Amino acid sequence: MMIILFLGTALALDPIARPEPPTPVEGECAKVYSINRGQPLPSPLLSPSGIASCSSVAVPLSQFSDLLQTEKWAKAISSQYSIKTNELEMEREWYKKKLEEESKPPPFLERPGTQRWFGRLETLVTVGVVAAGLVAAYQYGSGGFR
């Protein structure tokens, strides 16, 4: 039961934790504003004297679009090459069991040395029975038992 609990906890944890968001920079803008060509800058970005009231970064739209496409591509690659851990764990357990079975010594009667000795004894008994039969046949045929 404890193994299942630990295994479930381990699988539930994200292997690559999301980093904490950075601390806000002093003087940064409170939210995202769009800047359009030919339009004046949004009023929250400018102070009454006409200078910037907060700090921000303007990212070109094509680069932002490229970042979004790259993120979508990364998710697709990640899902395509995701490892099915359950299948791998089941396969690993199967190989462990197979290794344990193969590592156990065979039962006494199935060992090669025991089989050789049984074969030798079987041969001796067979030769003895055949020899006794031949001796009995010879004795009976020659009148030795009369």
Image: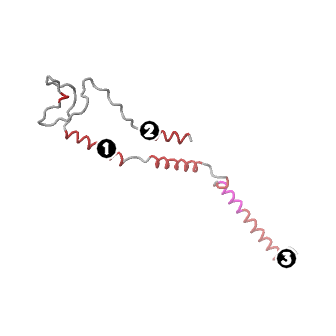
Q: CA distance from mark 1 to mark 2?
A: 20 Å
Quadrant of residue 39 in the image? top left
Distance between the Cα atoms at labels 1 and 3? Answer: 101 Å
Contact (CB < 8 A) between labels 1 and 3?
no
The range drawn in magenta is: 113-123
Q: Position of residue 124 (x, y in %)?
A: 72, 62
* Three-letter amino acid code of the residue under disc 3: Gly
> What's the distance in space between the residues labelled 3 and 2, CA to CA?
95 Å
Q: Earlier in the sequence, mark 1 or mark 3?
A: 1
Return the mark for residue 13.
2
Q: Which residue is mark 1?
A: 74
* In-image side of 25 versus 40 (left or right): right
Q: Which is more foreground, mark 3 or mark 2? A: 2
Which residue is depicted at the point 19% across and 37% down?
60
Residue 143's tag is: 3
Mark sitting earlier along the chain (1/2): 2
Q: Which amino acid lies under the numbered mark 1 shown in the image of this protein?
A: Ala
Residue 64 locus on image (x, y percent): 23, 39
Indicate which disc, 3 or 2, sits on the residue closer to the N terminus.
2
Between residues 82 and 41, which one lies in front from this camera angle?
41
- Is residue 120 found inside the magenta-colored segment of the image? yes
